[in-house]
Amino acid sequence: MHSSTLFTLAGLVSLSTAGYVLEDDYSGDSFFSMFDFFTGTDPTNGYVNYVDQSTAQSDGLISTNGSAIYMGVDHTNVASGSGRSSVRLTSTKSYTHALILLDLEHMPGGVCGTWPAFWTVGPNWPNSGEIDIIEGVNSQVGDSMALHTGSGCSITNNGDFSGSITTPNCNVDASGQATNAGCQVLTSAADTYGTGFNNGEGGVYATEWTSSAITIWFFPRSSIPSDVSSGSPDPSGWGTPLSQFQGGCDIDDFFEDHQIVFDTTFCGDWAGNVWTTDATCSSKASTCQDFVQNNPSAFVDAYWSVNSLKVYQSNGASNTTSSASPQSSSAAATATVPVSSGSSSAWNFGVSSAATASAVPTSGFSRGGNGRKTKTFGTAKDVVATVTSAVEAAVSDVVATATSAVSAAVSEDLVAEATVTATATVSVTGTGTGSSVAETTPSTTVVAETDDSSDDVSTHYVTVTALTYEEVTNDEKKRAPATQDLDKVKRQMQSHRHLRRHLFRHRGSMEE
């Protein structure tokens, strides 16, 4: 979404209005069927073994008891191998804009060695954003809320939330901030996280994501608004939130297509790195991993207990944004494609002038993306598909200008003898750990070609990406002829009917 191109796009326009209706209810027996179980290596280098649903069920790590959903960790065995067994769930459905209500009775926070989180994330991290709703490590008091994005997004304190901004730049590579820290808001309210939260029997976290801001509220068990309990949520009456992320960030440019995630990891890039600074935890063992490995009973209370999870949409619309028309364009474009190699050795690319590629970090205080295997580009096939797709997207708004150069040749019957050609070419080469990327060149598509020519009429060639015959001809019909001396063309034109017959005669072969 944040490709570097030679054209600009207008901002996204919000179509949402007041009022929310329920779109998805993750509560009860249907809960686990609406999530995928992540079983890969922890992107944050945690001492954890994420297990599949069958294993989690048989080992007692997950269960459903009426409306209560349990998600825990192994608290009976000394850990070995990659770490202590746990679960990481990612919703099968994605959202752009939403009101997410989580009624949570117990969380894993406040336990030394743990790093639990409830969050949302988009594809191609961090380009589509990450929203951390509940997060903390070790004996932390108070919730940590954060956004993680690419370059160009920051937040300011508008005085309308109770938390404190600790880092204002949401860019995971922002200078002057810890790697992947993002823009963070902390609250000192003890009942929002860990032991204090659990002692109060939890409450409801509400996250409203609109075009203008991402806002997070917490309601203790005794103070849940009646409109939340009745299923008719109205954020306008909820008072001061814990955090509101807005300011120097166009939300719709940095956040889209998010999945919902629950996970509990141990140690790793955050909990492990700050172990010695936590007086409560560091007194229990010299290292985080040593404590987590050898003290299974310490994690009896490291579990999520979910009463309900509901996703609402404004007026029932699952996507409340639409793209505006491009303001300007050019006949060339480039696309920067974030690619994670899934290994310690990043890919090195040789890419055609239509696209370039770079690597993204996969460690730090953020969980480094959603962990879906389809989003970890470790094979040649995945890299080629990703770069090709990015190039196609980058030129989609450029095609209008490129094709206007020949619009007089294929529209309004103002065609003299000419040759009109449209091609689609993407070339990618490169190497990576364990495999190589072979060069790929999609086939050339000939849009139209006349068999009559004239020295008096110019021949025009247009290079585009992934255009079909229908796309070009339909686009041409919508546009006025290019600025040419149309009278001259008319004078040169003895007859245009033969060309039209020729186009339709060859149409079948051109579409193949």
Image (spheres, rainbow, N blue to C red):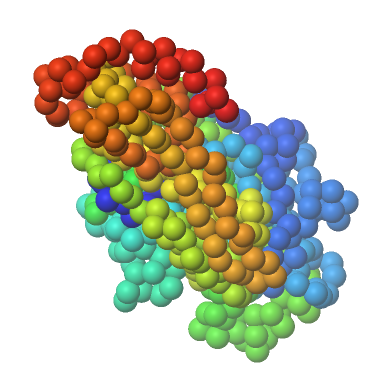
Name the foreground residue: 210 vs 39. 39
Name the foreground residue: 341 vs 307. 341
- Does residue 3 sit above or below 476 in this rendering? below
Q: Position of residue 285 (x, y in %)?
A: 67, 86
Outermost bottom residue: 286
Q: Position of residue 471 (x, y in %)?
A: 42, 26
- Does residue 328 sit above or below 24 in this rendering? below
Q: Is residue 164 left or right of residue 442?
A: left
Q: Position of residue 372 (x, y in %)?
A: 64, 52
Please report the residue visible at 49 percent of the width from the left and 20 percent of the height from the top. 507
Q: Is residue 191 left or right of residue 419?
A: right
Q: Is residue 333 left or right of residue 81?
A: left
Name the foreground residue: 90 vs 295. 90
Outermost right residue: 58
Q: Is residue 424 visible?
A: yes
Please report the residue visible at 31 percent of the width from the left and 48 percent of the height from the top. 332
Please report the residue visible at 56 percent of the width from the left and 66 percent of the height from the top. 430
Quadrant in which the C terminus appears:
top right
Please report the residue visible at 44 percent of the width from the left and 23 percent of the height from the top. 470
Name the foreground residue: 337 vs 428. 428
How many numbered marks, from 0 up? 0
Q: Position of residue 128 (x, y in %)?
A: 44, 50
Q: Hey, which quadrant is residue 33 in on the image?
A: top right
Q: Is residue 132 visible?
A: no
- Does residue 104 sit above or below 504 in this rendering? below
Q: Hey, which quadrant is residue 297 in on the image?
A: bottom right
